[in-house]
Amino acid sequence: MDKNTLTGFVLIAAVLIGFSIYNQPSDEQLAQQREQFVKDSIAAVKKQNDAKAAQAKQAKIEAEAKSDSTALFHNALNGTASNITLKNSKLELTLSTKGGTVKRAIIKGYTGHNITKGVKQDKSRDTQDLTLFDGDDQQLNFMLAAKDANIVTKDLYFTPSAQSDSTVTLTAQAGEGKSIEMTYKLGRNYMLHMQLRTIGMEGMFAPNYSQMDIDWQARCRQQERGFSFENRYATLTYKEKGSGTDYLNETSEKRDVAIEEALDWVAFKDQFFSSIFIAKTDFANNALMTSVPQEKGSGYLKEFEAKMKTTFDPTGKIPTEFEFYYGPNDFQILNNIEDESTFGKDLELQKLVYLGWPVVRWINRFFTIYVFDWLTRMGIPMGIVLILITLLLKLITYPLVKKSYMSSAKMRVLKPKLEAATKQYDKPEDAMQKQQAMMQEYAKYGVSPMAGCLPMLIQMPIWIAMFNFVPNAIQLRGQSFLWIDDLSTYDPIIEWGTNLWMIGDHLSLTCILFCVSNVLYSIMTMRQQKDQMVGQQAEQMKMMQWMMYLMPVMFFFMFNDYSSGLNFYYFVSLFFSAAIMFALRKTTNDAKLLAILEARYEENKNNPKKQSGLAARIQRMQEQQAELQRKREELEQKRRKLGK
């Protein structure tokens, strides 16, 4: 080792040692760190002990409940669980004799993708029908507090009777002449009716006892390819009695959230399917709701739990009645399912299909849904349906778009006139006079400078309406079009194993097409607007141009995980918008348009009373503002003179 190398190592070592000494914490800082470490350790131990205590308490409660039930239901606590199947053309339900509740729900006619833990979607694993839940994925427990016992139905074995394809009665015996009875009846579609009553047990409850406890738990399965996108629509939703629906936040963990109002129903909902629990006499105030998001790759979206109370008649004369909906989130099906209900309530189950804010919801409710269903019934491929809906919307908005375009065209052909009328106002302090001069020219020619903004105002509610409609359209689920395998989820051209920040684990082709077409459309509109800008306005447009070009980049990060159907609709919509603007530009005769404006100018010149429209109103407002400013300046000058 030569002398220079040795010297270099010595200097580096000296720097490192000096830096470590310089950054060494003081005695006070070390004391604070030790104190904080002790506090954190104590907090961690306390949290662990609290968790163990809570588990022990719950185990004790369950043991006591089971012990209490043993004395009363000693015969029903032992047995072998068996399955009972109720089915129709739409639904197949499996009930277990242990607990007496539904343990499996299969929705017929909808493909099951069977996305299990750690396994990507594979078409070879698809099933003809969809399993909504199975086994421990969903649990329902009824709890009754008798004088000398806590009755917990999940621990009881029931005996079936009066069984058919659509009905069954399950009975748990509690000694001679005493029992709990559950009666199920499956409707013709997706509705299951249930009655629960006690027989011969009225003396075992307190005189004022009138409510039972219910604990409903579920793990919401991942049913679709896109975990993140589907998870946005997986919510614990409920309907307040005499009011609208609400839901727990779909992105954050919520535990035991108390709902102050009485409830008509509670739903465990994913993107396209729901389990809905409906009470005839309402779920009482202060029900506790829990929603816990699950990790990607777990095979589940959320863990849900609803702890509720509802009416109970200890005499058994009036059964406690429930209805369950296990089925698709199809707006029309949910809207009509109330015909199967025997409760006579306005359930409004169709609100599970979110259609957007009021104005947007009206567009979807009274236009998009009916047109979509009409086209679907014709057997047209779903991709063509989206194209036809886009065309129809463009035809409806065409008159207003054309009127807006013509306003922009008028401003374009008037640009030389405006530049000549405002060339003397080039100084920054003359900006108001320049604007007034421009408004005066616009008013004389009968042109409104604000009409060019109309296309965006027209299209924005429609774009938002489709943003809410397409992801909720179950008809798109599993439907292929061109290169797209499933219009309800993303269409990857490339996938990789790990998530990249803001991108995910794939690139969606329809999202790329949408963003590229958005850039091209922005270039077209920016050029059109630039052609009508006067003076410094063109310079000011440069910042707007950059914003318009950056927006598609932002859209890419937003929509890469969204459904290919939505991206495809936006791509087609932009294509038709560009085609309309191109056709209008080619068919507009600038010379003829200028001649018409010149004739109007001659008519309005020296006759301000004939000037009308937005430009004239803006001009008058600016003149009034200028006059007020002039008077203020005069008053200010007088004050200064008096002050001297």
Image: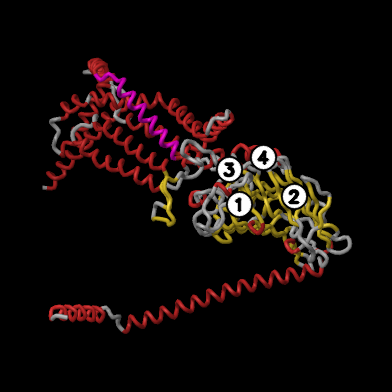
Provide the secondary structure element on which disc 1 rests. strand
Residue designated by label 2: 85
N-terminal-most mark, 1 or 3: 1
Residue designated by label 4: 337
- Relative side of 454 to 65, left or right: left
N-terminal-most mark, 4 or 1: 1
Residue designated by label 1: 268
Q: Is residue 510 above or below residue 194?
A: above
Q: Residue 178 or 506: which is nearer the viewer? A: 506
Numbered tag placed on residue 351 in the rendering: 3
**What's the amino acid at mark 1?**
Phe
N-terminal-most mark, 4 or 3: 4
- Relative side of 303 to 491, left or right: right
N-terminal-most mark, 2 or 3: 2
Estimate the spatial distance between the alpha carbons at disc 1 and disc 2, rounded to whole Å.
Answer: 22 Å
Closer to the eye: label 2 or 3: 2
Q: Is residue 617 above or below residue 263?
A: above
In the image, is residue 285 part of the stretch drawn in magenta? Answer: no
Query: x, y percentage for residue 202?
Result: 83, 60
Residue 286 in view here: no
